[in-house]
Amino acid sequence: MAELYRVQGKYAQAQPLYQRALAIQEKALGAYHPDVATSLNNLALLRVAREQYAEAEPLYQRALAIREKAQGPDHPDVAACLNNLAMLYKNQGKHAQAEPFLQRALTIDDKALGPDHPGLAPDLNNLGLLYHGQGNYAKAEPFYQGALAIQEKALGPDHPDLATSLNNLAGLYWEQGKYADTEPLVQRALAILEKALGLEHPDVATVLENYARLLREMKRGAAAGELEARARAIRAAHAKNNPPK
């Protein structure tokens, strides 16, 4: 029930349920059981969604400590905790604190999973996002490209997970004014999501809106207008079929 409330954005209702689950697990399993780490992570995610970063940090830190003690310092679950904590720091602009956590997570997953495993793609994307956010485009690009290459090889060229990597790389080129490099990536992300989610999905509308903004910067207003009209139709249909409760 707590997870349902969180997904629905009902954070105030979700929080006491997560806290109760954590208290029950601590009493039944002990303070250093991996399931306790899972509950801590869930509660931290809720805090992040509410932008309560100071409250989320000790929860992530405790989850990391539990994973390291229970599963060893080189377990992929430790890498997941490192990524969570690092992205918390990144979102607060604490790039220097985030970087070593992301690098350690990548090292752990590379060793545990192998260099071509799709589980490395989030690590690579996160490092790309970190350097991208710092304006270090040259350093971000190979991480985005590496994530995309791994996903293409492991998952196939039409897997929905590729859309995130394509959008990340497209955004990097867009900010540098490299429109000729940006457009085919956006087109490919759009085609993947249309195939995977259907033509009327809200995520498709988001890509259409982004593509339209790109086209306007490229002085192709007529084409942009067509995409914007399609995106508006998708949004309107979604709102009609999913009225607020």
Image: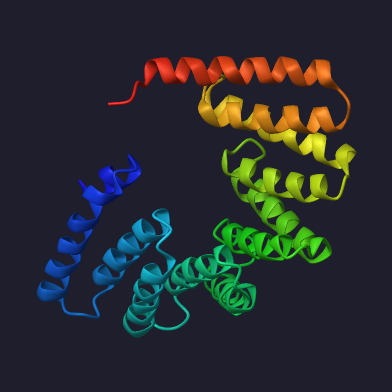
**Horizontal and vertical percent for residue 42?**
32, 60
Q: Is residue 174 left or right of residue 79?
A: right
Looking at this view, is 162 or 134 the one in front? 134
Q: How is the image coloured?
A: rainbow
7 in relation to 101, above or below = above
Q: In front here: 103 or 111?
A: 103
- Which residue is located at x 19 percent, y 57 percent? 16
Image height check: is 126 above or below 174?
Answer: below
Quadrant in which residue 103 is drawn = bottom right
The residue at 89%/26% (across/down) is 219
65 or 56: nearer the viewer: 56
- Does residue 140 appear in the picture of this structure? yes
**Res 187 seen here:** no
Q: Position of residue 91 (x, y in %)?
A: 56, 63
- Residue 191 in the image, given as x and y percentages of width and height: 67, 28
Name the residue at 61% across, 68% down: 93
Towards the viewer: 73 or 17: 17
Instruction: Indicate left or right for 26 with 115 as reference.
Output: left
Task: Tally the numbered discs.
Answer: 0
Which residue is at 53% across, 22% downward? 198
Q: Can you give x and y, in whole percent of width and height, for residue 182 in the image? A: 81, 40
